[in-house]
Image (tube, helix red, strand yellow):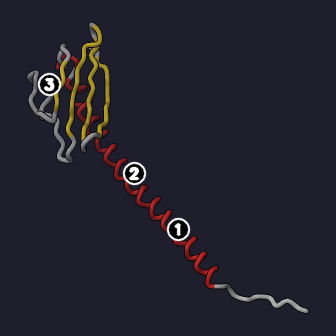
């Protein structure tokens, strides 16, 4: 007696193959969406870094003597300079929705710490710090 060989595929095999392909496609779509979100976040961080770096460079270019000798914080979210001329005009603001906070601390007799924070969104920020000496 000869066994008869089956040819073709059954409906069940086709349904299982379609299910596996559908799961793979959904996984790829989820990875693509996550990648898109990460790209947007990295662009925000890069812009925040540029805003903070530009402000830090303006302060550094103004010179050691223009930076106050006392500990203070200038909050760009509430643009009121506590010390005349610091930070240098124009006061930090960004049309992209980034606010800048500048903090100065006296670290030694001839050493000042300047920290610049760029804030955006509800809780995101970039912090850059430098030290100035005459």
Q: Residues within 10 Å of mark 3 (few under 14, many from 20)?
A: some
* Viewer-side residue, 77 vs 22: 22
Furthest toward the front, the residue is: 1
| Residue at horizontal 73 percent and vertical 89 percent from the top | 7
Using residue 7 as the reference point, say whether residue 77 is left or right of it: left
Q: Which of labels 3 and 1 is toward the front?
A: 1
Q: Secondary structure at mark 3?
A: loop
Marks 3/1: CA distance? 58 Å
How far across and how far down the image is residue 87, in percent? 16, 27
Q: In the rendered view, tell whether residue 109 sits above or below residue 19.
A: above
| Residue at horizontal 45 percent and vertical 61 percent from the top | 30
Q: Which of labels 2 and 3 is toward the front?
A: 2
Q: Which residue is mark 1?
A: 23
Marks 2/3: CA distance? 36 Å
How far across and how far down the image is residue 64, in percent? 22, 18
* Viewer-side residue, 12 vs 102: 12
Q: In the rendered view, tell whether residue 41 sits above or below residue 8.
A: above
Q: Which residue is mark 3?
A: 86
Q: Secondary structure at mark 1?
A: helix
Using residue 4 as the reference point, say whether residue 110 is left or right of it: left
| Residue at horizontal 18 percent and vertical 20 percent from the top | 72
């Amino acid at each position: 007696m000869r066994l008869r060989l089956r040819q073709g595929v059954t409906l069940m095999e086709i349904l299982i193959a379609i299910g596996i392909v559908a799961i793979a496609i959904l996984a790829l779509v989820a990875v693509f969406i996550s990648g898109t979100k990460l790209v947007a976040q990295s662009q925000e961080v890069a812009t925040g870094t540029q805003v903070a770096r530009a402000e830090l460079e303006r302060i550094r270019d103004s010179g050691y003597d223009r930076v106050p000798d006392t500990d203070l914080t200038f909050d760009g979210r509430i643009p009121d300079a506590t010390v005349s001329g610091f930070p240098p005009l124009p006061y930090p603001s960004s049309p992209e929705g980034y606010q800048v906070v500048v903090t100065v601390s006296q670290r030694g007799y001839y050493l000042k710490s300047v920290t610049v924070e760029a804030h955006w969104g509800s809780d995101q920020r970039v912090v850059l710090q430098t030290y100035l000496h005459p």
